[in-house]
Amino acid sequence: MKWRIASVAFLFSAVGTGLTWLTLQRPLLALMDVVRQCTAHGSLEPTVLARTIGSLPFLLALDLMLLTLVSYAVLDFMVGRPLRRTEDVVEQLGRLELDVSLPESPGPLLSRIQRALSRMTLALQQEQARLAQAQTELVSAERLATVGRLAAGVAHEVGNPLAGILGYLSLAGARTKDPEVQEYLARIDHEVQRIDGIVRGLLEIGRPGGKQLGPVDVRHVVETCVQLVKAGRDFSHVRMDLALAPGLLAKADSGPLSQIVINLLLNAVQAMDGRGVVRLSTRGEGSDVLLVVEDSGPGIAAEVMPRLFEPFFTTKEPGQGTGLGLAVSLHLAEGMGGKLTAENRPGGGARFSVLLPGV
């Protein structure tokens, strides 16, 4: 690049010097005639003429050199440097390195090129973001499809034992007259049926939901889930803080919503190692209903956050989790027309928010 600019500068200087010589040639010839006449009459020394003519090539060469340097400096500043920086940017874009910095002052000759490069860089960045999102969605869909295929086998194998348990519960309920025992059996029957619904609901992962959604009292669902999990050993040192607004109805399905709440509660307790505070709150969010589950644990690590809802991704020890809880919960929330998001609380701990359409 620099040699090319130097060649162009020399060419311009040579042309300028040649034009200068052509311009001065006629006056110089006339001056030489005057000098000859004066010399012939003895009024001018011959050495003056020789010295003047002899200095012309040196002056023209000096003029050529100065013009070349000035032309090179101007061309390099106006064209060379911006072109080299633009060339570096184009090479970076060619390597798909989109975090580039364009020259701030490219000069008037390259301003349009810079604007075109800026538009192209922005378009490539947007396209790269769309491709990354599409790739993430494809990977997630493939993993969810794998879960669906696995769930088909699980539902088939688990369905028969669950049917047997329900049958024995029915027989036990018919043979006992104790109201308290019958109440326990009714609760067991309800939870076994819910397990059966959860297992069969896994078959719908990756497929569009076809269930009819109806008004669901979010407060009642949350209170039922809390009463269910509080009896577990893992919750013996956990304090539940409930701030549930009454009368909030969401367009949802109580079964999937219960599964989401229980998954979030179990994750919160495991994140706190079985000790701490879990706060559940509900409120209206415009025409929607917002359910928030917060814990006092260490929060979500920055490297974990982007993969939090990926199927089979887990930070738990082997044998303690499959990495499906949040992925399934997200799918269930989206199947009801809602959203499930996660973030860290300013004061520490994690916050999961379930946004559902209101009735």
Image (cartoon, rainbow, N blue to C red):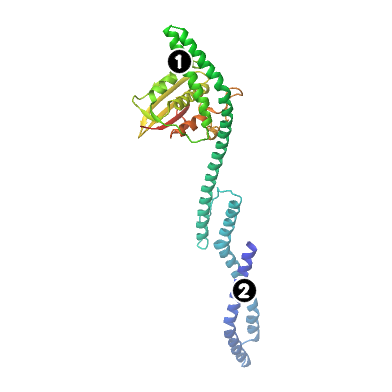
Disc 2 marks which residue?
A: 14
| Residue 238 in sight from this viewpoint | no
- Residue 6 falls in image quadrant: bottom right
Residue 256 location in percent, x, y? 46, 27
Residue 25, percent across and down? 59, 83
Within the image, what quadrant is residue 145 found in? top right
Nearer-the-camera pick, 132 or 359: 359
Q: Residue type at mark 1? A: Arg
**Residue at the bottom extreme of this rendering:** 41
**Looking at the image, can residue 207 be seen?**
yes
**Residue 179: assigned label:** none
Residue shown at 46%/11% (left/top)? Answer: 173
| Kind of residue at disc 2 | Ala
x, y percentage for residue 182? 44, 10
Marks counted in the figure total 2
Q: Residue at x 63, y 84 (%)?
A: 49
Distance from label 2 to label 1 (Cα)?
102 Å
Check disc 1 and report the residue beneath it: 187
Given residues 35 and 43, the one toward you in this image is: 35
Q: Secondary structure at mark 2?
A: helix
Left or right, 213 with reference to 263: left
Q: Secondary structure at mark 1?
A: helix
Badge 1 local density, few (<14 within 10 Å), some, or many (20+)?
A: few
Q: Quadrant of the C terminus?
A: top left
